[in-house]
Image: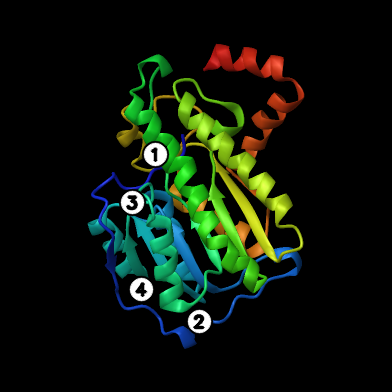
Amino acid sequence: MSHAPSPAGHSRVTPARPVAPAVGSVRRPATGRGGRGVCGGTALVTGASSGIGAAVARRLAAEGGWRLVLNGRDVTRLEQVARQVSATAFAADLTRPGADRRLTEHVLGEVGAVDLLVAGAGVGWAGDFVGMPHASIEEVVNVDLLSTVHLVRTVLPHMVAAGSGRVVLIGSLAGSVGVRGEAVYSAAKAALAAFADALRYELRGSGVGVSLVVPGVVDTPFFDRRGAPYQRSRPRPVPAERVADAVWTAVRRGKDEVYVPGWLRLPIRVRGTTPGLYRRLAAHFG
């Protein structure tokens, strides 16, 4: 319900190396107690070919103090974004076996550390679940959940060893309340939210923080690629840059969760306190 990366391309890993800032020009990350806030260093952003991931890359570049490594599946678009922000591009389909390891090794080989991981890749599919093709189920679960979990598993030991860092996961309102016609997407994003919570508890005291950014509807190519346009009058789509602002808030302030827009906390609270009422309203209004 929130965002999407570039459409899937080939599985070949295609590193591209635009001019990036010299290592000496990037200040080392500054973190507070318990990983509360990261001020600079090396940031790895996935899903950066377009949409939220590309907006996050631009926001981090504008803030300064970051050396950026961008990942996506659309080689041409990824390299365009990388050139705009003076980043290193590493095109790869993270659903392919071993792609997470190759990406992590590339980043560590380039700069020796990952101080921030923003997992922005995601795909959707719209329609009744009984009509959803098996291949689409596999793609949504693999892209939205499994590839992110595997990448975090590969990157995280290096952050823990350094005693600092932050992982930012891009969730969705659909993962908090469920959305009609997006059953598998809702399930994958709900699992991602639970993963963020569990990982946060596990990493307590390690210096590594975990943030979940929860957008509602975002104005990206997501809806074109999921097979159906967005047709509801509410909530209105927000620009991807607004989600990038929320990511920066999570990074700078070390926040556990950020909702975009902030009023999305209301339906989530209604569902949590009076689930029966929420379900009746959701069934009526869709």
Instruction: Answer with left or right where residue 115 lies relative to residue 253.
Output: left
Contact check, label 1 and label 2, Cβ < 8 Å: no
Q: Between marks 2 and 3, how big is the CA–CA gap?
A: 28 Å
Label 2: few (<14), some (14–19) or many (≥20) C-alpha neighbours in 10 Å = some
Q: Between marks 1 and 3, how big is the CA–CA gap?
A: 13 Å
N-terminal label among 4 and 2: 2
Three-letter amino acid code of the residue under disc 3:
Asp
Give percent across and percent down for residue 96.
35, 49
Q: Is residue 233 above or below residue 108?
A: above
- Which residue corresponds to mark 4? 86
Contact check, label 4 and label 3, Cβ < 8 Å: no
Three-letter amino acid code of the residue under disc 1:
Val
Three-letter amino acid code of the residue under disc 4:
Ser
- Residue situated in front as seen by the camera: 223 or 10: 10
- Which residue corresponds to mark 1? 123
Contact check, label 2 and label 3, Cβ < 8 Å: no
- Residue situated in front as seen by the camera: 134 or 20: 134
Identify the residue at horizontal 49%, vertical 51% (top origin): 150
Residue 68 in sight in this render: no
N-terminal label among 1 and 4: 4
